[in-house]
Image: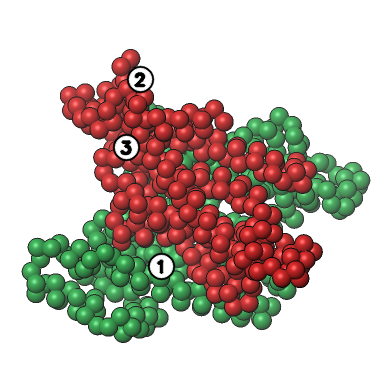
Chain colours: A red, B green
Amino acid sequence: MAVILLFVLGGIFAPWISPHDPYEISLQDQLASPSLSHPLGRDLNGSDILSRLLHGARISLSVGLLVVIFSGTIGTCVGLMSGYYGGWTDSVLMRIVDILLAFPGLLLAIALVAVLGPRTTNVILALTVMGWVSFARLVRGQVLSVKEREYVLAARSLGQSDAGIMRHHILPNVLSPVIVQATFSVAGVIVAEASLSFLGLGAPPGTPSWGSMLSDGKQVLMEAPHVSFFPGLAIMLVVLSINLLGDELRDLLDPRDVQKKHLI
Amino acid sequence: MLVFIVRRLMMLVSVLLGVVTLVFFLIHMIPGDPVDIMLGENALAADKEAMRQDLGLDQPLHLQYLSYLSGVVRGDLGTSLLSRQPVLKEIWSRFPASVELMAGAMFVALSLSIPLGILAAMKPRSLMDALAMLVSFLGAAIPSFWLGPLLILLFAIHLNWLPVNERGGLEHLILPAITLGTALAAILSRMIRSSLLEVLGEDYIRTARAKGLRERTVVLKHALRNALLPVMTIVGLQIGILLSGAIITEFIFDWPGLGTLLLQSIHTRNYPLVQGCILFIATVYVVVNLLTDIAYGWADPRVRLK
């Protein structure tokens, strides 16, 4: 939790707490090792790594949250409709899901960013296109079991509209796994964004994103390992903590699973 | 069984058709004129026109789609813009390197995860279990684009034990295979642990123990074989992780596989090759999934009925 808090606060307040300008270029101090004024050292352009790391948290955080909000919303709506209406709606929507799932991992995002151009907005778009699918699958499965319950039948016999039933009776009952999934997704999206930036397909060159910092570090691995070390460590710590938070949330929101989890 | 296979094959065809359609529209999603982007705005008008004809971009969209589709069916994925070679030929020339990397990674994943999973499952909630699961937790969280450089730093630069970059003998494969295989090892060791724990609760295990067999024989001979069946099918499905993870690993180690081909073609805006690579990787993935499904259906008759 502490790491997540640090990450979120660091990201939000980056412009105010950064000790230096992350874009400042000072070629005579290229690759300087960590020192008192630059605790994590300087990178290839002589920029302060700590400041870039803090601004990078801002990018990771905003991309992570935006993608999960967009893909969670789209996926939940699609899953609700697909599960509730069934029949043709379900077949068509799930075929689209199957097609998107045929692209392993990052491939679809790489393809989309490749044609749209490396920009943060395109990264968000590409990761959303890739991400809503798992939410849709999850929600559809939940809806299929919830919609047969008596209270849904009761609402229907009282003449409530489909939209009303979905909003008031089904959605609240399928939301907790969605929240858990969303938490894990934030970690997944942060890694995906960093991967894209690492491959040169994320934020434009020069932007202080964790992935591109690692990519820069790869070129100077021999002379200045600290350039790669800190952004990588940051990504790993954040991903670890978010996954732990996800585990906690899962236990909290679904007490039935706790027993099962201990068995597994 | 036949009905099951036919049904799966029909699903495969429809999914592949969707994939081809999506990949076809990729090139049409390029904002602005794709020819301008590929050749640069200062190119000669005649060159642009030639390329437009070459790519069939001067024809109506539905005709372009049909000709692309018929090309794909015949194995013609177009011509690479730079080398002027057939796209499929370039892809084939890179494919063995990717397969080699994935096989290496799979070997690493299995040889790490099976012992870890067994150790953890033999004494659940012991120190050993906690340690094994901690390793797997860390392995899942460490991004390959950090692990790769760290491994290079340690084994290639500091210790000077292993070579880095380029494909060569077995020693060239070790670091990339560990980089790519670690995440999979983490996932698999958890699965093997839970699958083994489940099997260890079965009656026939109690019988084996009651017979007075040594614990080692019980776990390795009786339990592990049954526990690995579901894990093996997951291994098939996880090939996707390797396929896309390979893109990053190949980039780190300059490995001459499909991933670097895809990235190079993206950076040189060689769109027919980009399309070809994406289509090829997705197809390999879908086909491997299908084979896994069929193998599982063959091994476990209950699956066929679903």
Give the number of callouts: 3
Image side of residue B296 versus residue B33, left or right = right
Name the quadrant of the C terminus of chain B. Answer: bottom right
Name the amino acid, label 2: Pro
- Contact, mark 3 vs mark 1 (Cβ under 8 Å): no
Image side of residue B191 versus residue A154, left or right = left
Depth check, mark 3 against mark 2: the one in front is 3
Place of residue B114 in the rendered image (x, y in percent of width and height, measured from the top left): 64, 46
As rendered, which of A136 and A77 lies closer to the eye? A77
> Is the residue marked by circle 2 packed among few (<14), some (14-19), or many (20+) residues within 10 Å?
some
Secondary structure type for disc 3: loop
Residue underneath mark 3: A208
Q: Residue B280 shows which numbered tag? A: 1
Residue A18: quadrant of the picture: top left
* Inter-mark Cα distance, 3 to 1: 33 Å
Asked if B129 appears above or below B228 in the picture, the reply is: above
Residue underneath mark 2: A39
Tell which subunit mark 2 falls on.
A
Q: Residue at x 14, y 76 (%)?
A: B49
* Inter-mark Cα distance, 2 to 1: 46 Å
Place of residue B293 in the rendered image (x, y in percent of width and height, measured from the top left): 62, 68
Image side of residue A8 versus residue A53, left or right = right
Depth check, mark 2 against mark 1: the one in front is 2
Depth check, mark 3 against mark 1: the one in front is 3
- Contact, mark 2 vs mark 1 (Cβ under 8 Å): no
Tell which subunit mark 3 falls on.
A
> Is the residue marked by circle 1 packed among few (<14), some (14-19), or many (20+) residues within 10 Å?
some
Name the quadrant of the N terminus of chain B. Answer: bottom right
Tell me if I can see residue B174 in this picture: no
Place of residue A235 in the rendered image (x, y in percent of width and height, measured from the top left): 45, 36
